[in-house]
Amino acid sequence: MAEQQQFYLLLGNLMSPDNGIRKQSEETYDGIPGQNKVTFLLQAVRDATGTEEVKQMAAVLLRRLLSSSFEEIYPGLTVEMQTAVKTELLASIQTEASPNIRKKVCDIAAELSRNLVGDDGNNQWPELLKFLFDSVNSQDVSLRESALHIFWNFPGIFGNQQQHYMEVIKRMLVQCMQDQENPQIRTLAARAAASFVLSNEGNTPLLKHFSDLLPGILQVVNESCYQADDSVLKSLVEIADTAPKYLRPNLEATLQLSLKLCADTNLNNMQRQLALEVIVTLSETAAAMLRKHTAIVAQIPQMLAMMVDLEEDEEWAMTDELEEDDFDSNAVAGESALDRIACGLGGKIVLPMIKQHIMTMLQNPDWKYRHAGLMALSAIGEGCHQQMEAILSEIVSFVLLFCSDPHPRVRYAACNAIGQMATDFAPTFQKKFHDKVISALLQTMEDQTNPRVQAHAAAALINFTEDCPKSLLVPYLESLVQHLHVIMVAKLQELIQKGTKLVLEQVVTSIASVADTAEEKFVPYYDLFMPSLKHIVENAVQKELRLLRGKTIECISLIGLAVGKEKFMPDASAVMQLLLKTQTDFNDLEDDDPQISYMISAWARMCKILGKEFQQYLPVVMGPLMKTASIKPEVALLDTQDMENISEDDGWEFVNLGDQQSFGIKTAGLEEKATACQMLVCYAKELKEGFVEYTEQVVKLMCCPLTPPVRVRVAAAESMPLLLECARVRGPDYLTQMWHFMCDALIKSIGTEPDSDVLSEIMHAFAKCVELMGDGCLNTEHFEELGGILKGKLEEHFKNQELRQGEDPYHAYKEKVLPWFEQLMPLIVQLICPSRPWADRQWGLCIFDDVVEHCSPTSFKYADLFLRPMLQSLVDASPEVRQAGAYGVGVMAQYGGESYRPFCTEAIALLVGAIQAAESRSKENVNATENCISAVGKVMRFRPECANVTEILPHWLAWLPLNEDKEEAAHTFDFLCDLIESNNPIVLGPDNSNLPKIFLIIAEGVANESVKSEDACSKRLANVVRQVQTSGGLWTQCISSLNEAQTKALQSLLSSA
C-alpha cells in the first residue's frame, strides 16, 4: 500500500510544471520494472478515490507501455496476472463514472487486444469480443459508446473471425448510425465504420458489401459539422485518400456534400477547408473517377471564392517581417487546393473550366478579386502547363498590366504570378518575354513607398534569372546592375537610419542570382558591390539581422564563384577571415540560426574557388559541418491519442500507418543536415587526397542506415566513390578496408531503400565504386546477396509496377557476372514482353544492352531471348523503347562480334525508317532518333559489310550533328574524324564541296557542348579546321556560312584544343 501511495506521488510529479521535478520523476519511473508498472498503473486507474488527473495520467502511461513494450512485459506476467488485467479493464469500462477516464480505458483495452491477435489471426481475448456484442445492444448509452470506441480504435479486433461476423458488424454499425436519440452514438458509429473501411482498403468485396453504409456516414458528416465536430469529416478525407473506390457508388453525393459544406460561411474555416480537402484529395487519388462527374467538377471555382477571403490591412505594404503563410486562412487553403487539383485532374479539364472565372476576377473593381485571380494563375501553372504554354503570350501580357495596378497587394500578386511562371515555364518564359518582364520588374522594384511589393519584385527577378540562359541576360546586365546597386545603396541607408531590412535581404539575393547566371560577365561590376557586401557582413551582427547576414554571405560566395579565382583573390583573404570569425562564433549560434546553412554552403563555394588552397581551413570548417550532418531526427510511433497532443506546427510530420497509428518524424534541422551532407560531397570531390584526414569519419556518418530526408541518402550514395578516391593516397590496404565497410552498407541500402529515385543513385554509386576498386572487390557472397535482392525487387515489380532503372553490374566484372545474371533471366525476359508497360520494356532492353556491351561474344548464347524483341523495339510507339533498342544495335556492332552480323544488317532499314519518320525530331522523339543515327554510324564504322555505306553515308552526314545525347554525339564525331582523316570522297564531296557543311556540323557541336575540349576528338576536329585555314578561298567559303555564335564556337575550339 505504501508503495502504491509513493507511486501516486510519482504520477503527480510527472505532471509537475517544474522541469527539474518532472525530469527526476521520469528517471524514477523509467527505473521501475515493467511488470510492476502494469500493476501500479492498473491500480491507479481503478482507484475510485484517485483524482481525475492522476487516473488519466496512469491510463495514458499504461496504454503507452502496452504499445511500446508489450513483448518485453506482458508474456512475463503470470497467467493469473494477465487474466486480472483483462478482467479489471472490462470492469473499469462498466463502472467508471468519468466519461474521459472511461474513454482512456477503452484505448488501453483496444491496445491490449491489438497485441493479443496472434499471427494466425486468433484473438486471445474472446471475453472482449463478447463484451462488445453485449455492450452494443445494451440500453446503457455509455456502454454502447465504449464498444464503438474500442472498435473504432482497433477495427481488426475480430481477427480471423471477421468474415464469420461480417453481417453482425454491419448490422451493429447500421443500427448505431440510425440511433435518433443519441447523436454521439451516430457520430461514433460513422467514425467506426470509416475506420473499418480504411483497415480493409484492399478488400474489394468487403468495400462493396459495406457501400450501403456510406449514405449514413455522409449524413453524419453533415450533422456533426453543424455540432462543431469535424471528426467524421476528417474520416471522410482519410477514405478519399486511402480507399477512394469505396466512395464510387455514392461519389456524386460525396461531392455535393463537400461542395455544400465548403460554400457554407456559417461553418468555421477549418471545416470548410476539410470539405474542400475531400474533393482535392480525390482529384489526386481517383482523378479518372472524378473527371466523369463534370457537372460537379465545374463547381470547383468555389476555391476561387475562398481565395477572395482576405482582410484589409493598412500596414501590410510596410511590413518589414515576412510572416509565414497563414495556412489556416481560406485564401491560402484555396490557392493550395487549386494547385493540387490542377495537377490531379490535369489542364485539359481545369483550364477551360477556370479561365473565364479568372479573367472576370481580374476585371473586378474590388482589389481582393484581382489579387485572387493573379494568385490563381500562379497556382495552376504546374498542373495546366501544356495548355497554358499555348496561350502564354496572352497571359503574360495581361499579368504585366497589373504590375502598375493602383493597389499594392495586386502588384504583389502580379510579381508572384511572374515569379511562378518564370519557374514553371522556364526557359521558354525567359526566351520569349525577357524584354517585357525585366523592365516591368525593375520598374516595380522602384516602388519605394511599398517595401513589401519592392521585395516581392526582387524575389520574382531571382526566379527569372535562376533559369535564364546567360546569353539572354547579358544584354540587360548593365541596366540590371545599375538598378540593383541604386536600390542596395538606398536600402543600406534605410537599414542604418530605420532598421528596415526586408528589401535589402531580397536585393542581396537578386544580385547573387544575376552574378550566378552572368558568370565572368559580372567581373566589371564586382567592385561596385563587394565593398558594401563585406560591410554588411562585418556590421550586421544583431540577432534580427541574422537572415540578412546569411544571405549576404551567400551573395559574396556566389559572386566569387561567378567571377573566378583571379578577380576574387585580392578579397579572398578578407572574406575568409569574415567567415572564420562567424565560424568561431558558430558555437554561440542558436540551432535555428539561418546563418548556419548559408555558412555551410558558402564554405563549399569557397572550396571550389580556392581549390587545394582551401585545405588549410578544413580544421575550422569540419567540426560544425560534421555536427550539422550528424543531426539525428527525432522519430516516434504514435497512436491517435498521442497525435492529439502533437501538431504539425510543432515541426512534426506524420505518415498514417493505419490501425489508428502514425509514424511521426520531427523535421527541424533536417534540411540543414541535407545541405551539410551535400557539402561533404563537395569537399571530397574538390580536395581529393587533401580530404583524406576526414574520410574515415565521413564514411562512418554516410553509411548510417535509412536517414531522412531523401537528399541525405542521395548525398551519402554520391559520396562513396569520391571518398574512395580521397583514400587512395593511403595505399591499397587502407582502401580495401574502407571498401569492405562501404560495400556491406551499400548492398544493405540497395535492399532496403524505398524510394526508386534514390535507389537508382545508390546503384549508380555502387557501380562506380566497383569500377574504381576493380576486379576481385566483390566475392561470391556479395553476388548472391545482390542477386537475391534484385530477384526480390523484380518479383515485387511485377506485382506493383514501380521500379526504375539501376546501374549495370557488368561493367567491371564482365562475364563473371553471367551465372548470377542467369538466375534473374526468366524475370528479365518477362520485362521485354510486348504486353508489358513501356518502362518495363525499356528497362529490360537496357539490361540486355549492357550484357552485349560488357559480356560479348559470350552474350550471343542469350540471343534467342532478346534479338526479336530488340528488332521490334526499333518501330515501337514509345520513344524510350526505341532509344534502348537503337543503343543495343550500336553496341552489337561495336562489341558483339561475328555472330551478330545478320542482325546488324536487318536493323539498318528499321533504323533509317525511324530517323526519317515525320515527327522524328520532335521534343519527345529526338533522343531516340539521335540514338538511331549513332547506331547507323556504329554499324558503318565497325560492321561496314552489314550496310550499303556508299548509299547511306550522305544521308548520315545530313542527319548530323546530334544536339541532345552528348554521349552518342561523341561517337558520331569520332567516326566523322576517321572519315575526314582518311579523305573519304563521299564525306568530303567533289572538290571538298561538303566542307562548309562539315564546318557547320563541327561549329554546332562545339556551341551545343556536344564536343568538349577534354574529348579526344576535339583535337582531331581542330586539326581539320586548321588544315582548311591554310587554304584561303576554301576557308572563306566555310566561314561565311556560319553565324556569329558558330564562328565563336570554332574560335574557342581552336584556342582550347
Image: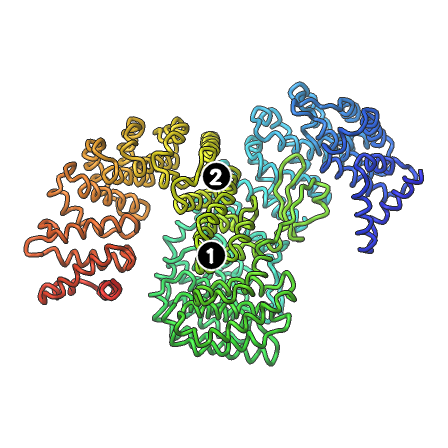
Left or right of residue 724, residue 323 in this image: right
Please state which amino acid type lies under the numbered disc 1: Ala
- Please indicate whether residue 466 sits to the left or right of residue 412 in the image: left
Q: Is residue 760 visible?
A: yes
Residue that badge 1 annotates: 684
Residue in the picture at 24% in, 57% down: 1018
All told, the count of numbered labels is 2
Foreground: disc 2 or disc 1: 1
Helix, strand or loop at disc 1?
helix
- Most extreme residue toward the top, as rendered? 164
Q: What is the secondary structure assignment of the residue under circle 2?
A: helix
Answer with the quarter of the image where residue 102 lies: top right
User: What's the amino acid at mark 2?
Assistant: Arg
Mark 2, Cα crowd under 10 Å, few <14 / some 14-19 / many 20+, is: some
Q: Earlier in the sequence, mark 2 or mark 1?
A: 2
Left or right of 147: which side holds 821? left
Name the foreground residue: 780 vs 236: 780
- Mark seen at residue 382: none
Q: Position of residue 803 (x, y in %)?
A: 45, 37
Quadrant of image for the N terminus: top right
Residue 845 visible from this viewpoint: no
Between 230 and 322, the one nearer to me in the picture:
322
278 over 969 or under it: above or below? above
Query: x and y percent of residue 70 in the render?
Result: 73, 33
Q: Circles 2 and 1: CB distance less than 8 Å?
A: no
Q: Which mark is residue 291?
A: 2
Q: In the image shown, does 150 or 1002 lie closer to the viewer?
A: 1002
In the rendered image, residue 234, in percent from the top left (x then y), is placed at 65, 41
The colour scheme used here is rainbow
